[in-house]
Amino acid sequence: MAFYAVASGRRTGVYDSWAECEEQVKGYKNAKYKKFKTRQEADQFVNGCKSYAPQDVAVPLGRGQAALASWKNSTGVIGNPKYTEEWPEENHDQAEDDLNAAMNEVEGDPMPSDSSNLADILNRKRKGTHSSDNRNKIPRHASQVIEAAGLKQVGAFQFEIDAEGYVIVYTDGSCIGNGRPDACAGYGVYFGKNHQLNAAKPVEGRVTNNVGEIQAAIYAIKTAIDLGIQKLCISTDSHFLINSITLWVTGWKNRGWTLKNNQPVKNVVDFKELDNLLQSNNITVKWNYVEAHKGIEGNEMADKLARQGSAMYKDRNR
């Protein structure tokens, strides 16, 4: 049995087949990968190429620390979005950036788009024929690691909270074979090291990475609401998810869940459920962007859980 280690690619890690490895490195600039005979050698290759491993820098909080007495009331996205006109060098497999850019041309431009569907937009951009005006700017958010400022006891569970009293959670989606008939997708929700509520789940419905991202957020919010948590900070590596919720969803609803170019919103069932949860008076959600595969423990662990969810999907649908 061979093991394929990806130290630099769309998703780093160790894969059991060349097909899975190829999805992470094909078309990826400066990809770093290698085939090994043992899992141990593969793991050493991946971790040896990192500046540090997440477990080496994680510092557990003291369990005697009490929750802060009062919190500021804050909502929305943490930090101000950063904008860029740069179109990614990656090919069409770079689904997150491609879709984010195409959606922003449709939704973020006050002027009518000169293309009637997302496929035309993507093709035109890949050929380098896009204009340099503001409509092609991609909303991107600064990566920020939320530091835990204390602990909050909720029933039988203890949660890390930030300085404003928001319970900290990381979410991620995963899809092996994205776009293929045999694709397997899942999602991960990570509240902390060895936390009882950490979850790895297979997706329901459409089998894509974006569905995993949305359903991970839904699961985290439902969990918080069920426990009576009123303030939740979701850290995700999906610009598309954050932009959908904070920039575009209001327009979608006003147009009957359609885009400005009259195309239907994909994953509308999941987006509707997420929007309904956010519109309730039971919880306030703060969105935070974290860059993927940079050794951020919460993101790395949510990614690991999401990949477990994909494996569960595969087992369930054999």
Image (cartoon, rainbow, N blue to C red):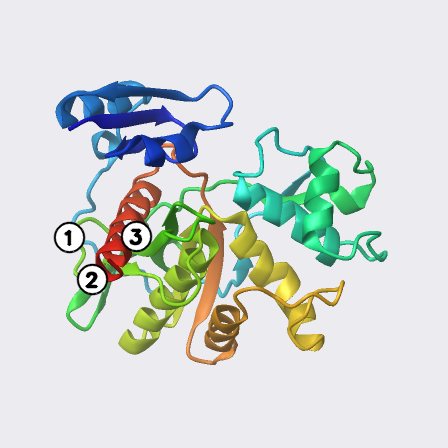
Which residue is labeled 3 in the image?
310
Residue at the location (16% across, 21% down)? 37
Amino acid type of the residue that numbered disc 3 sits on in the rendered structure: Ser
**Left or right position of 247 against 161:** right
Indicate the position of residue 210 as horizontal and vertical percent values. 47, 55
Residue 274, placed above or below residue 200? below
Alpha carbon separation for disc pair 2 and 1: 9 Å
Of 24 and 230, nearer the camera is 24
Residue 269, placed above or below residue 170? below
Amino acid type of the residue that numbered disc 2 sits on in the rendered structure: Gln
Using the image, tell me which numbered label, if any, was put on residue 158: 2
The answer to whether the residues at label 3 and label 1 have Cβ atoms under 8 Å apart is no
**Left or right position of 248 against 156:** right
Which residue is labeled 1 in the image?
63
Indicate the position of residue 284 as horizontal and vertical percent values. 46, 69
Q: Quadrant of residue 60?
A: top left
Q: Quadrant of residue 147?
A: top left
Of the two numbered discs 2 and 1 in the rendering, the one whose residue sits closer to the viewer: 2
Alpha carbon separation for disc pair 2 and 3: 28 Å
Residue 158, placed above or below residue 155? above
Alpha carbon separation for disc pair 3 and 1: 33 Å
The answer to whether the residues at label 2 and label 1 have Cβ atoms under 8 Å apart is yes
